[in-house]
């Protein structure tokens, strides 16, 4: 047993749509009696790739005592439910880690969570005209880390709030011009940070009354979709009807 992050499913919110089932590469979630259920603790890696696929916000991450993640059990389970092909195409990463950190070239996936894989982008150099001059920064505040920004920060007043994944500005070259410009911003990582703290902080920001809209800029990798769930839960917790927009950034620097 270990004290670790685990998926938690609120059956009262779950409508049994089943979108979370294929979102879980380990097959740890199944629909039973009309509700999504975690089949076994040792099948859940706790990374939350399923978070962003729940339209009801019924899936969250909690820390509790649970069996260690077991890759061998996952492989056997996938064979039993007829998803063996998934194992061959996307094997679990070493020691149950997030596949997003594995080395990879842009060929068909060889396994693990795409969000943690090291990748080498070989691209043609942009034309000189595209890089002429130095672009000014569109950042109009400090700090930017969600953990550090107080809910009543004056720079939130009357602005759209950009909730951005840490990796986004590195992946998308025109992040400042196309995404950040004219918005306040907070950044974080749903994989490594305290998601419950994020929900509480965002909810407090919404309740403070200065934000006009939330824009979530997340990476295309599964674990990053947790930012969407965080935003939705924060809006629900605040009790305020807040517009929400999603921007998906590809790992090769394109917008999806």
Image (cartoon, grey):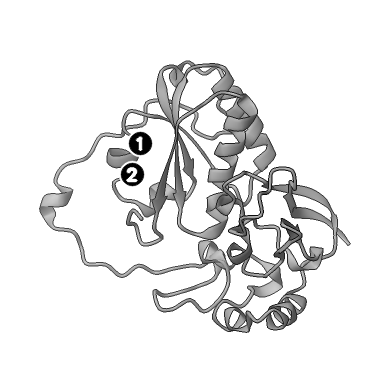
Of 54 and 144, which appears nearest the observer? 54
Q: Residues within 10 Å of mark 1 (few under 14, many from 20)?
A: many
- Residue 217 screen position, x and y as percent: 43, 44
Q: What residue is disc 1 on?
A: 180
- Residue 135 screen position, x and y as percent: 23, 38
Q: Which numbered disc, 1 or 2, marks the residue that appears first in the sequence?
A: 2
Looking at the rendered image, the quarter that the N terminus falls into is bottom right
Label 1 and label 2: CA atoms lie apart by 6 Å
Q: Is residue 113 above or below residue 209?
A: below
What numbered label is drawn on residue 175?
2
- Residue 13 screen position, x and y as percent: 69, 43
Q: Residue at x 70, y 58 (%)?
A: 46
Q: Residue at x 17, y 49 (%)?
A: 131
- Give the total number of marks visible in the rendering: 2
Element on which disc 1 rests: helix
- Residue 36 screen position, x and y as percent: 71, 57
């Amino acid at each position: 047993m270990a004290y670790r992050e685990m998926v938690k499913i609120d059956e009262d919110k779950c409508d049994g749509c089943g979108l979370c089932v294929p979102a879980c590469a380990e097959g740890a979630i199944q629909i039973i009696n009309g509700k999504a259920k975690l089949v076994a603790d040792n099948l859940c890696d706790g990374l939350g790739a399923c978070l962003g696929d729940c339209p009801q916000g019924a899936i969250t991450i909690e820390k509790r005592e649970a069996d260690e993640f077991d890759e061998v059990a996952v492989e056997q389970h996938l064979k039993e439910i007829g998803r063996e092909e998934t194992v061959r195409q996307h094997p679990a990463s070493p020691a149950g880690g997030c596949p997003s950190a594995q080395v990879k070239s842009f060929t068909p996936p060889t396994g693990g969570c795409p969000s943690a894989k090291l990748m080498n982008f070989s691209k043609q150099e942009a034309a000189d005209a595209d890089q002429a001059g130095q672009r000014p920064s569109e950042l109009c505040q400090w700090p930017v880390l969600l953990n550090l920004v107080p809910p009543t920060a004056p720079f939130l007043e009357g602005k759209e709030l950009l909730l951005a994944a840490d990796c986004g500005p590195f992946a998308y070259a025109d992040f400042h011009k196309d995404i950040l410009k004219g918005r306040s911003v907070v950044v974080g990582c749903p994989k490594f940070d305290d998601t419950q703290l994020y929900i509480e902080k965002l909810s407090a920001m919404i309740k403070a009354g200065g934000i006009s809209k939330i824009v979530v800029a997340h990476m295309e990798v599964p674990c990053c979709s947790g930012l969407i769930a965080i935003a939705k839960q924060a809006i629900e917790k605040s009790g305020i009807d807040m517009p929400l927009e999603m921007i998906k950034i590809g790992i090769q620097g394109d917008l999806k």
